[in-house]
Amino acid sequence: MLAPSGKRQKIALIVMANVSYWRTFWVDSGETGLLPGHEHYWAMWGFGFLDVLGVTPGPLNSDVGDQILMIKDVRSEADSSGGRRLYFTVRNTGPVRAIGYGLNFSFVSP
């Protein structure tokens, strides 16, 4: 493309990413909670091929002590029709039961 001065000009296409978030939670209806060393297994879907996903646990606070959770074993799956799923595990790595937690998701789409 020629600029008004007659010199060649480059045109760059800039694509901005879309950032979205979502959250859910788990709370024990009894008194057991997620015991130290125990795990919950989760699956989610509804995202695209080039999406970048993140998940962070947010333990509820209580008077039982420090609650420490981790996300592990993150796995991604695509089926033959193009459907995508994400599998992950929430593990209680703390010294006391976790009475509940939130899961905070972030999505970055091109």
Image (cartoon, helix red, strand yellow):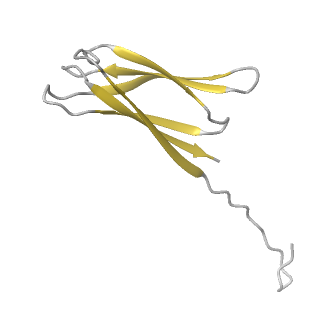
Residue 57 placement, left or right of 80: left
Q: Please tell me which residue is depicted at 80% across the width and 73% down the height of the picture.
A: 9
The N terminus sits in image quarter = bottom right
Front-most of residues 107 and 30 = 30
In the drawing, does residue 105 fall left or right of residue 59? right
Q: Image point 28% across, 14% down: which residue?
A: 37
- State the residue lying farthest toward the front: 29
> What residue is at 76 percent from the left and 23 percent from the top?
81
Residue 93 drawn at (x, y percent)? 27, 21
Q: Is residue 80 above or below residue 105?
A: above
Question: Quadrant of the rendered structure where residue 94 is?
Answer: top left
Q: Position of residue 96 (x, y in %)?
A: 19, 20
Closer to us: 88 or 26? 26
Along the line of sight, the residue nearer the viewer: 55 or 32: 32
Q: Is residue 26 left or right of residue 62?
A: right
The mark tally for this picture is: 0
Image x and y of residue 56, in percent: 40, 35
Q: Is residue 65 above or below residue 41?
A: below
The answer to which image quadrant residue 75 occupies is top right
Q: Position of residue 50 (x, y in %)?
A: 65, 38
Name the one closer to the observer, 49 or 34: 34
Q: Would residue 94 appear left or right of 48 to someone viewing this image?
A: left
Q: Is residue 110 above or below residue 32?
A: below
Q: Residue at x 24, y 14 (%)?
A: 32
